[in-house]
Amino acid sequence: MKFVRFVFLALLACVSPSAFAQEPAPAPDGTPAKEEQGYKIRGLSFLVDAPATGVFIHDPTAKPGTPGTAFGIKNYLNHELSVVPSTADNLVVTKSGDSASIKDPASVLAKIKLPDHFKKGIFVFLPGTGKAGDPIYRTLVIDDAVRVFPRGSIKVINLSPSPVKITLEKEEYPFKPGESKLIEKPPVNDQNASSMTAMAFKDNQWQRFGQTLWPHPGQKRVIQIIFENPQTKSIELVGINDIAVRDN
């Protein structure tokens, strides 16, 4: 499969930006606007090829004929999101807004099981298993409610097949393959940054694959994703800043 670190850019040309929800504007008298009810979701793509058409999220428990919600998937995180009017514990992502598409294997892109108490979050789209009958994408769900992903914190996700350890200043954070951890109060130096060293256990030895400074997120948040490059088989790390933290 062709390696594309961040994709779905072509998707944005297929779906009008007006289809995506944004921070609601207050009324002229300053009264806060009433927000739409439902799951508030942002989409992030990683290591996958872009679909040929637009993407829609469906509630499989909705009344037949209920159209899907246009879903924006990007290579960055900002204030734009999709509001899915649902309380179901699972969702289906397809290439069509037609509710019948959830029963068409050729149209289904992903089936997503939501964690308990989920209300808002980030869907990270990853390559699927490749097994016959499985959707072409699997989805990592990140609950980005401030109560579980606070301001000023770093969420590290190890998508690689290797054990990894991240050292910030003198504090070490180990990660098993597939494991994620939240670093709520990253240790910093007098520059308000963390000296970071990343090591992966490969070929029966620890190998360094990253060394840099991680600035403190301040009032924002950062997602750090560790992955294996499909072409080089080397372990790599990329950071994604969440520049629009919503407290609700």
Image: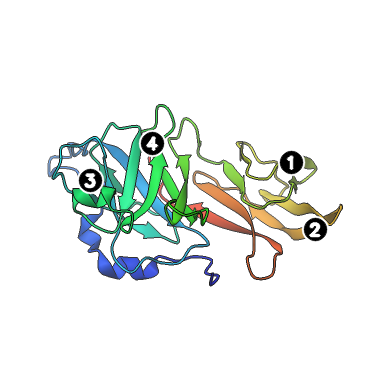
Q: Determine whether the residue tagged by mark 2 lies in a helix, strand or loop.
A: strand
Percent position of residue 178, x then y: 63, 44
Q: Earlier in the sequence, mark 2 or mark 3?
A: 3
Residue situated furthest right in the rendering: 205
- Along the line of sight, the residue nearer the viewer: 230 or 199: 230
Question: CA separation, marks 3 and 1?
Answer: 40 Å
Question: CA separation, marks 1 and 4?
Answer: 29 Å
User: Residue 208 got which mark?
Assistant: 2
Percent position of residue 228, x then y: 66, 59
Q: Is residue 107 above or below residue 167?
A: below
Residue situated furthest top in the rendering: 117
Q: Is residue 209 left or right of residue 160?
A: right
Q: Amino acid at mark 4?
A: Asp
Q: What residue sits 84% from the left and 57% below the top?
A: 203
Q: Earlier in the sequence, mark 3 or mark 1?
A: 3
Q: Determine whether the residue tagged by mark 1 lies in a helix, strand or loop.
A: strand
The residue singled out by tag 3 in the image is 24
Please state, as top left, top right, bottom left or bottom right, where the C terminus lies in the image. Answer: top left
Residue 21 in view: no
Badges 4 and 3: C-beta atoms under 8 Å apart?
no
* Residue 227 image-quadrant placement: bottom right
The residue singled out by tag 1 in the image is 174
The residue singled out by tag 4 in the image is 247
Question: CA separation, marks 2 and 1?
Answer: 14 Å
Q: What residue sits 52% from the left and 53% below the top?
A: 129
Q: Amino acid at mark 1?
A: Pro
Percent position of residue 179, x then y: 63, 41
